[in-house]
Amino acid sequence: MAEIESKQSFEVSILGHELGFDGAVRAGYLAKLLETFRWQMGRSQSHPVLSRFKAGVLRAQTIELFHDIRMGDELRVEVFLSRVGRTSLDFESVLFTKAGQKIGHSLATIVAIGEKGPEPLPPELKEFVHPGEMKHPELGEVDPARAYLRPDRVRPSDLDLFRHMNQSRYVDFADDARLLAHADGHEAGFTGPLGVISISYEDEVRLGQKLDVLLELLPDGSRRFGLRREGETKLVTKGIVKGR
């Protein structure tokens, strides 16, 4: 199958209002930007992949950045299908500068959803796969006894048009947790550039729900992230956060 049919390239110029407090694009905004590109692919009548199934939900995503993204940067983002399973598929996104330097990449796993839950994907989708280089890291359970914990709540501004918390806000929660833990003097906190953030969406949270945000320092220096509803022990989100 011709590469142009299943790999798409997008160009974007970074503006000032897209920056965080440190002058760089935050991981949560980047997650939303990459989601927009996947939507654009899905709405394109010429794209052969996303038109082959009715609906999907994001099950996991990993973002790795090698350099900061700042105002005035002009990026080219290649998005392509890198894996097809029975009911899920992976989209990989690779970020380049205008000069061609690779500055980051992302992996998003989407589960096809039908009327009764996960739905088998058409096997012919495998014809459009381009080999990628990313895998999601293994995620474990946060140890609440060792973790930084802070309360939070799902706000109206967290919701998307489907009226549940947008996938990018979970990324923001994890990024915020490491900065707030540092401000509070907890060992799990750290500042500086973010290298890797990986999120697994185990369940969804809704408007007004009270949450516990947890972050645990691991022996290798990475941080294990978790999100749970107040009063519950089961995590609705698992993750890993690493500095660059």
Image (spheres, rainbow, N blue to C red):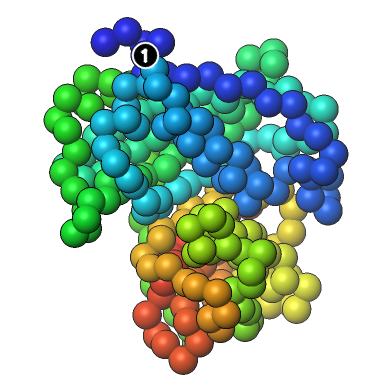
Asked whether 217 or 133 is in front, the reply is: 133
At horizontal 19% and vertical 59% (from top left) the residue drawn is 116
Residue hosting label 1: 5
Vertical side of 81 occupied by 184: above or below: below
Percent coordinates x, y for residue 41 in the rendering: 45, 28
Kindly give the residue lying farthest to the top in the view shown.
2
Asked whether 54 or 107 is in front, the reply is: 54
At horizontal 69% and vertical 13% (from top left) the residue drawn is 99
Vertical side of 151 occupied by 98: above or below: above
Percent coordinates x, y for residue 138 in the rendering: 36, 55
Asked whether 2 or 82 is in front, the reply is: 2
Q: How many marks?
A: 1
Vertical side of 211 occupied by 104: above or below: above
Name the secondary structure under disc 1.
helix
At horizontal 32% and vertical 8% (from top left) the residue drawn is 2
Percent coordinates x, y for residue 211 in the rendering: 54, 80
| Residue 237: quarter of image | bottom left
Q: Is residue 192 visible?
A: yes
Q: Is residue 221 visible?
A: no
| Residue 98: quarter of image | top right
| Within-10-Å neighbours for mark 1: few <14, some 14–19, many 20+ | few
State which quarter of the image contains the N terminus.
top left
At horizontal 50% and vertical 30% (from top left) the residue drawn is 40
